[in-house]
Image (cartoon, grey):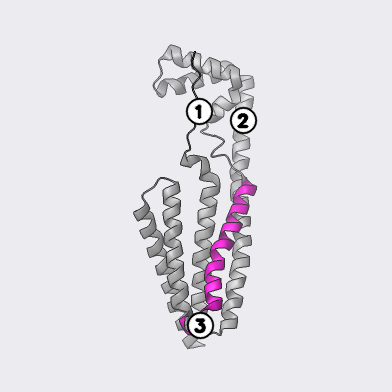
Amino acid sequence: MPVHPRHRERHAIDHVGWLRAAVLGANDGILSTASLIVGVASASSGPREMIVAGTAALVAGSLSMAAGEYVSVSSQADLEKADLHREAHELRDDPDGEHSELTGIYIRRGLEPALAAEVATQLTAHDALAAHARDELGMSKATSARPVQAALASAASFAAGAIVPLGVAAIAPFAYVSIAVVGISIVLLAILGGFGARTGNAPVARAVTRVVLLGAAAMLVTIGIGRLVGASI
């Protein structure tokens, strides 16, 4: 009998955990740091104050993203553990009922009743808890909560995003800081939006347009507020 090579496929869902955190972190790092820098610059503060504010935004934002992501994903992990613990008790106390429940799931997915029962029997014999986690609770390795991974991805991506507008602000002439930071940030947001959409097999043009418009609006609002505050002080 011929041996066929193992068929391997790569799906976007396999990267959903780290990709979501990384894209969100980088986008937030670019937008929040750039907005703060142009806001401070528009208030007619000096370059020193602007760089200090941008550096503080990078450090505080990275730590905040890491802490927030860790707490959020840890809560998800706790819920997953609680559901698995409950399911394990149900499998122990009512195995026949759980088998019937699994059979019903496969019937609703299109299998004939006899085949659905056989599939449920074999999967239960192999790993009952894994079968119920996947098919009843909708859990999988690809989407399972990983708090530390998500926290590190968020912190690193935020810092990577924030360092670019901060670097531009540090080297650009102060009179042109706002123009330079806004321009570079919009380009980066467009690239990031396109990357995230392409990796997730989503429409690229729509994602790029959305992130650019929202990012530009946020920075323009911050510039306006900075000028109002600077004029009133």
Q: Earlier in the sequence, mark 3 or mark 1?
A: 1
Disc 3 is placed on an element classified as loop
Q: Position of residue 89 (x, y in %)?
A: 64, 25
Label 1, secondary structure: give it: helix
Is the residue marked by circle 1 packed among few (<14), some (14-19), or many (20+) residues within 10 Å? few
Magenta segment, prevailing SS (helix, strand or loop): helix
Q: Earlier in the sequence, mark 3 or mark 2?
A: 2
Q: Is residue 29 above or below residue 52?
A: above
**Label 2: which residue?**
86
Asked which secondary structure carries label 2, the reply is helix
* Span of residues in magenta: 147-176
Judging by the rendered image, the residue that carries numbered circle 3 is 173
Q: Nearer the viewer, mark 3 or mark 1?
A: 3
Residue 132 seen in the current view: yes
Q: Nearer the viewer, residue 209 or 119?
A: 209
Question: Label 1: which residue?
Answer: 135
Question: Front-most of 123 and 75?
Answer: 123
Residue 157 sits above or below residue 52 on the image: above
